[in-house]
Structures are given as C-alpha cells and as structure tokens.
Amino acid sequence: MEPKRVLAIDLGLKRTGLAVTDPARIIASALDTVSTNELLAYLTRYLARTPLEGFVIGLPVGLDGRDTDATPHVRKFIVQLRKTFPDQWVETVDERYTSSLARQTVLASGKGRTARQDKGALDRISATIILQGWLDRHALRR
C-alpha cells in the first residue's frame, strides 16, 4: 500500500496556510492559502480526491512555552477537525519562530516588495516550515 500524504495547517484568524507532503513523505510543499472560515469545506474537497493519513497543525505558544491568545482558537479548531475527519490523526507541533522564518525565507528569495507583502505566501511558507520540521523529526525516528 502506498503511503498517504500528511497535510500541515498554519491556522490564522483570517487566513490559513496549508502544506502537504509528497506520497513518499520526504518533502513538504506549499499547497494553498484559504479563508479560515472556509477551511473545513476546502479540506473536505481535498480529501475527496487525495488520500491523507493525518494532519499536522501548528500550535501557537509563547517564548516561555505558555499558551498565547491564539492557542484556544487552534485548540477549538482541532476538536472540529477530529470530528470532521475521524479517520485521520491530528498532531500538534510548536510553531514558535515559524512566522519569522517564513519572512526570512521570502526576503532571502530575492522577490520584490509585492511578493514580500503577500500574507498568503507567508501563511503557505509557514505551513511548509511546520511540515518539513515534522518530517525531519520523523525521519530521525526511522
């Protein structure tokens, strides 16, 4: 049986960045940025055409390791996600520093000012960073 993909979610109040693995689970790639209030419908359509094993979702925590103002929003979404997709597992990962790494990535890419101001691109890159970190940690366990 071919391994299934894993999808990462960088949940925001307005927009959500998504990234997905290749079937071999070696590389994370940016997938899309969607309106957060349309996220579950988007994921339902996506899973109808692409088998997924599970979800990795960034959990916002402060520098001191405590919950932030955004953490309850993410925890509430995780409950909805598990209810909507009971056949897929859901794993959280610490998303500290992800946004700043995404900004650094865009700056290092040499793209123009318009690209740097594309918040959707930052959300997709953040999701990709979250997922690639998850992949790297799981590769070490093999």
Image (cartoon, rainbow, N blue to C red):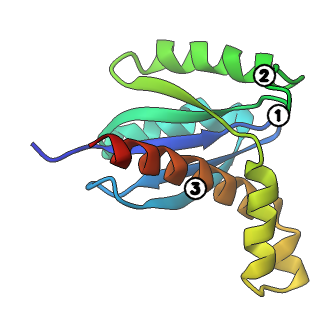
Where residue 73 appears, x then y in whole percent? 77, 20
N-term-proximal mark, 1 vs 2: 1
Closer to the camera in the image, 26 or 86 = 26
Q: Residues within 10 Å of mark 1 (few under 14, many from 20)?
A: few
Quick one: label 3, few (<14), some, or many (20+) residues within 10 Å?
many
Q: Quadrant of residue 93?
A: top right
Q: Earlier in the sequence, mark 3 or mark 2?
A: 2
- At 15% across and 47% down in the image, what residue appears? 2
Dot 2, crowdedness within 10 Å: few (<14), some or many (≥20)?
A: some
Q: Single out the residue that lies furthest toward the left.
A: 1
How far, Cα to Cα, is label 1 from label 2? 11 Å
**Residue that label 2 marks:** 71
Q: Is residue 34 above or below residue 84?
A: below
Q: Of the residues shown, which amino acid type is indicated by label 3?
A: Thr
- Find disc 3 in the rendering and name its residue: 128
Q: Nearer the viewer, mark 1 or mark 2?
A: 2
The residue at the point 87 percent across, 78 percent down is 114
| Residue 120 placement, left or right of 47 | right
Q: Could you tell me how far apart the alpha carbons at marks 1 and 3 are, in whole angstroms?
A: 18 Å
Where is residue 25? Give x, y as percent: 33, 53
Left or right of 15, for residue 19: left
Side (left or right) of 134 relative to 67: left
Q: Which mark is residue 13?
A: 1
142 left or right, relative to 131: left
Q: Secondary structure at mark 3?
A: helix
Quadrant location of the C terminus? top left
Tell me which amino acid carries mark 1: Leu
Q: Position of residue 48 (x, y in %)?
A: 34, 38
The span from disc 3 to disc 2 (Cα, nearest Å) is 20 Å
Could you tell me which secondary element the residue under label 1 belongs to? loop
